[in-house]
Amino acid sequence: MFRHKIPLAWCQLTREKSRLFVALAGISFANTLMFMQLGFRDALFDSSTRMHQNLNSDLVLIDPKSEALIAMQSFSWRRLYQVLAFEEVESIEPLYLGLINWKNPVQKNDRSILVMGFNPNKAALTMPEVNQHLDKIKLQDVVLFDRDSRPEFGPIPDLLAEKGSVETEVGMRRIQVRGLFSMGASFAADGNIITSDLNFIRLFEERDYGQIDVGLIQLKPGADPEKVRQKIDDYLPEDVRVLTHQGFIKFEQDYWATSTAIGFIFGLGVAMGFIVGIVIVYQILYTDVSDHLAEYATLKAMGYRDLYFLSVVFQEALILAILGYFPGFSLCSFFLYSLTQNATQLPVYMTVSRALFVFCLTLIMCAISGAIAVRKLRAADPADIF
């Protein structure tokens, strides 16, 4: 019997070509909306934690009033040096963070940029491009520029390739760009520069050298980060907070997901796409059932049970889900994601997990629509229809 159900569902869908096309277009639109919203959400999390992911540390020390990378509170580095009392600790490193105005060397307009400062005698980041230029940032007023920053900062990579160095103004100070690295823009900062801790203090004259934003803690091989974190947390006063490396990443993600409207908006966009898809598929299936109600009634009078009709409608929903999924998937994978990435410099790209997740949502969406649409058929009495 199964081999007779598939042709029936397929024939009913393809009988009205225009209706089938509208249904597939609607499902593709819903899929595209979900893909784009999920892409934006994942880009938000990925871009906002790029620095966190590249930190050369097992544990991180921050002020408990800090909310995110763009809202860090400084604390005394004495707390960081107290950590050296633990035998599991290999080394420590202060990290300075701040937003400051960058002057485009060509167009002369200002734009806010994120500055990261640390002692260049020790690699604070696990980025080979940065570590090979540490000697350069030891020089006064020398910085490294993120080549993946937004283009509004100027054609720094091209100028650097042409001249060997680029001179511009950061804050109220003249600086030189002597090297490049790749980190990328985020929702928090459109661009990034890296320099030494001393150069950082020169840029932020109001900052105290003993007040740091993040304390990086490197443990000895074999030490358990979570156990050491707990020991340090119990030892230090409550004016600092100890996180594991992964905990620091989650700390940033939680801020964007729950403390800002951005995370909610992207989640709402996915929900709206899901609801739109349900409505579109329901309208198509309901209309199809209504158009063939007399035929269904005949089969019902012949002894076919509701389960049979339910299977036919669900097969139609499955066919719509599969055929409608691939146009949306292809549009995002090969066009919209690339367009968005080029326009925003954000890491928007297709992932296997996202593709499978949206496909499952599409199946569920069409199944719900089929379950609602078949209620009219189940309630139909052949005697009433004839």
Image (tube, rainbow, N blue to C red):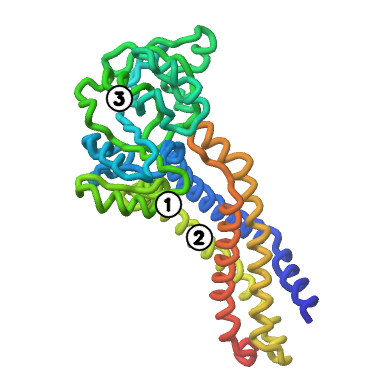
Residue 162 lies, in percent from the top left, at 53, 8
Could you tell me the amino acid type at mark 1? Answer: Asp
To which residue does mark 2 refer?
A: 274
Residue 313's label in the rendered image is none
Residue 384 lies, in percent from the top left, at 60, 90
Of callouts 3 and 2, which one flags the residue occurring earlier in the amino acid sequence? Answer: 3
Give the Cα distance between marks 1 and 3: 37 Å
Relative depth, front residue between 213 and 3: 213
Query: Which picture quadrant has residue 4?
Result: bottom right
Could you tell me the amino acid type at mark 2? Answer: Phe
Give neighbour class at mark 1: few <14, some 14-19, many 20+ (Cα, 10 Å). Answer: few
Query: In this view of the protein, can residue 153 be seen by the observer?
Result: yes
To which residue does mark 3 refer?
A: 100
Residue 224's label in the rendered image is 1
70 to the left or right of 31: left
Query: Which picture quadrant has residue 324?
Result: bottom right
* SS category of the residue bearing label 3: strand
Of callouts 1 and 3, which one flags the residue occurring earlier in the amino acid sequence? Answer: 3
Q: Please report contact status of discs 3 and 2: CB closer than 8 Å, yes or no.
A: no
**Count the marks: how many?**
3
| Foreground disc of the pair 1, 2 | 1
Q: Is residue 192 above or below residue 346?
A: above
Could you tell me the amino acid type at mark 3? Answer: Ile
Q: Is residue 298 above or below residue 188?
A: below
51 to the left or right of 301: left
